[in-house]
Amino acid sequence: MKEIVINPITRLEGHGKIIIVLDDEGNCKKAYLQIPEIRGFEKFAEGRHVEDMPQITSRICGVCPMAHHMASTKTLDDLFKVQPTIPAKKIREMVYNVFMLEDHALHVYFLGGPDFIVGPNAPKEQRNILGVVAKVGKEVGLKVIEMRKNLRKTNELIAGRTIHPVFGVPGGVSRPVSAQEAEEIKKLGDESVNFALFTLKVFKDIVLSNKEYVDLITSDAYTHKTYYMGLVDEKNRVNFYDGKLRVTSSSGKEFAKFDAHEYLEHMAEHVEPWTYVKFPFLKKVGWKGFVEGEDSGVMCVAPLARLNASDGMATPRAQEAYEEMFKTLGGKPVHYTLANHWARIVEMIYAAERLRELAYDPEITDPNIRNLPTATPEVGIGVDEAPRGTLIHHYETDARGVVKKANLLVATQHNSARMALSVDKAARSLIKGGKVDDGMLNMVEMAFRAYDPCHACGTHSLPGSMPFMIYLYDENGALLRTVKRNLP
Amino acid sequence: MDKPKIAMYWCASCGGCEEATVDLAERILDLVKLVDIVFWPVALDFKIEDVEALPDGSIAASLINGGVRLTEHEHMVKLLRRKSRIVVAYGACSSWGGIPGLANVYDDGEFISRAYHEVPSLENPHKVTPQKTTAINGIELTLPEVLPRLLPLNRVIDVDYYVPGCPPTADVTWGAVQILLSGNLPPKGSVIGASEKSLCDECPLNETKPDKVLIQDLKRPYEVIADPEKCLLTQGLLCLGPATRGGCGALCVKARMPCTGCFGPLDRVSDYGAKAASFIASILDFQDEEAIEKVIDRLPDPVGTFYRYTLASSSLGGKARRK
């Protein structure tokens, strides 16, 4: 039996490799996405001053540091039983939307976009941002680069730093927004909406007008029917900063809606011996292995899942784009993994419009930005929607605010089971009769890339020296035998 | 003539160093006019076999971020060392271990049970644990092993230069790139791109800092609203600026939060945490032991405070490995 190894997988955040197993006819029999990465945040969080957690956990991921910083800051609010002031909440949400916009733009133009803008089979030297610039023209390329730069400068201004922010404190933020800064951010908000709508146009012109690409997006090779999860507001519209977690089934019905404090009733994590990433699933459905459908607890998060799990968007242009996407792709829910690219642009429009709304809100410059905590800390749980999906932090401390236990359920993790399904299905659909080339292997990578995964996030934990155990499975995945060494 | 080749790689990193490079923004387009990037997994599709195919010494410089945590990282950095004429430890993790180096306060066996057997969200009745080798479907899947401790890059391979910061800012990165491209290289082991002075030297609040700072209490940042016009240290907030290399432009202080030391030590300081702790001890203004003890009680996590980015390179080392 022959194996093909893609190592490392590229244009994503973090490490990974794909093992493709071929049978004697050269057809892909099975493909695995392995995550060889691990650092141990849950353990070394123990003993730390809890107020340092927003800055420590941001180091789980330098691409989405704001997502961790914010989930952690909200966990501190809960832990110290203190609400942020209204201006502080607005500043947080405004900055959060700046971040969502620039992070999604990174994926559209630098990470995932090259597969469509340059082409899935283009030579590998060209499948990148430089190829994108060559294709769309230097002027447009510079516009994209300039826009991301301005968004990230704004995050730095308000949050202290864009990579690893520092402004989150229990009960508020560390600095106010001045009237002059607000004027600049209003301009940025206006430009952002134009930029997001421009991005939708690029997507329509390059991707949707190309039948080959549309066929690829809607092909069975990249389709799975699973549960979807995302944060929603009181009207079940997408919200990145706060709300309730809503889960819908593959037929589009609401399956559950709950507060993050109840996460342990709804979610559990499964462990496999062949990868460091854990596989969260819906506890009330149960882990049934790597299978799709309503009897399997496998779920999906991030842009497409958020749109599937909601009833709409809270801003007008985003709502239009939301309706157009579902109408074009045959109604809700959409199960095409590659439609994540479109959903991501719908979310860019929402982030830009919400950023603009908040920038024009007069309260954004109110200097009342902190409520000082007085309660003794004990337990806190916080949630937000990272660009890559639902993010939950959970800390327990002693009375001095020293972390005793930490648990983190991280965005990319929730997609890990569906991503494993996606890589396997794409490889089995594409690789036949021993015919394999670089473009085909890239199309296998596209199956995970659409999720915009971050394996640094997914594997924030760390196991340590390996006790040794071999699990032998039959072809149906049933456990035949285990061989142990160095294990109790 | 061919352009010089450069490679960028991540070990146990968060990707922030990659983003810091992307934050060069339009300067990236200038950079690629001058060099060929031959390996950069976050943005380019070159694979390990492409690096292996290059002749030894053919890469002008490799910028490596992240600490060495797994056997795979060890393998990759040795490969890049062999292929490169210059190796740069880029960022805090690669230079001194960084925040993931805090893992060294626990013995590595403790992690397995926490991550895979203990956290409350698990459903793992058979205590399945990731394995070096798993036989499945007629093949063997392998995972890299975890090293007993996280190691800074220079404990594994020879390092020529260091670019500090968690992460280095775009300006610091650009400064370092200019030095590397100039051909006018400083002595081996130099820190490049950042300041040679302490953070205080570039801090907007420096003029409010008295010659001799003395404090009678330590405040944790959530307990007080800091006066934005006054040196944070004089307000009892543990700002580590005096012990820390400058270069970032005092970003945290400008956001009214204390410096946590991510640019690491100044030249000729080998143990950043010891230096920072002894500096803070020297400004505590107390006569009697009881008062000192009371203040120390206000700081229950000295390791996470003083050694947040440098534990893995410090003289403290880490917890001994369980037999």
Image (cartoon, rainbow, N blue to C red):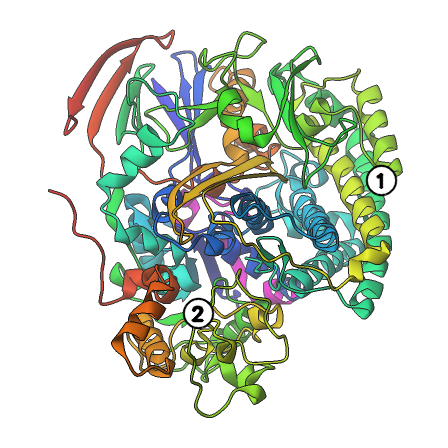
Residue B56 visible in this rendered orientation of the protein: no
The answer to whether the residues at label 1 and label 2 have Cβ atoms under 8 Å apart is no
Residue assigned mark 1 = A201
Judging depth in this view, the residue of B142 and A26 nearest the camera is B142
Secondary structure beneath dot 2 equals loop
Asked if residue B36 is among those painted magenta in the image, a careful observer would answer yes
Residue A355 visible in this rendered orientation of the protein: yes
Residue A191, quarter of picture: bottom right
Q: Position of residue B37 (x, y in %)?
A: 52, 57
The residue segment tinted magenta is B30-51
Left or right: residue B241 versus residue A11 is left
The residue positioned 83% from the left and 21% from the top of the image is A328
Judging depth in this view, the residue of B131 and B234 nearest the camera is B234
Residue type highlighted by circle 2: Gly
**Chain letter for the residue marked with disc 1 in the picture:** A
Residue assigned mark 2 = B261
Left or right: residue B105 versus residue B163 is left
Secondary structure beneath dot 1 equals helix
Asked if residue B124 is among those painted magenta in the image, a careful observer would answer no
Q: CA distance from mark 1 to mark 2?
A: 44 Å
Q: Position of residue B24 (x, y in %)?
A: 62, 64
The residue positioned 72% from the left and 19% from the top of the image is A334
Judging depth in this view, the residue of B170 and A38 nearest the camera is A38
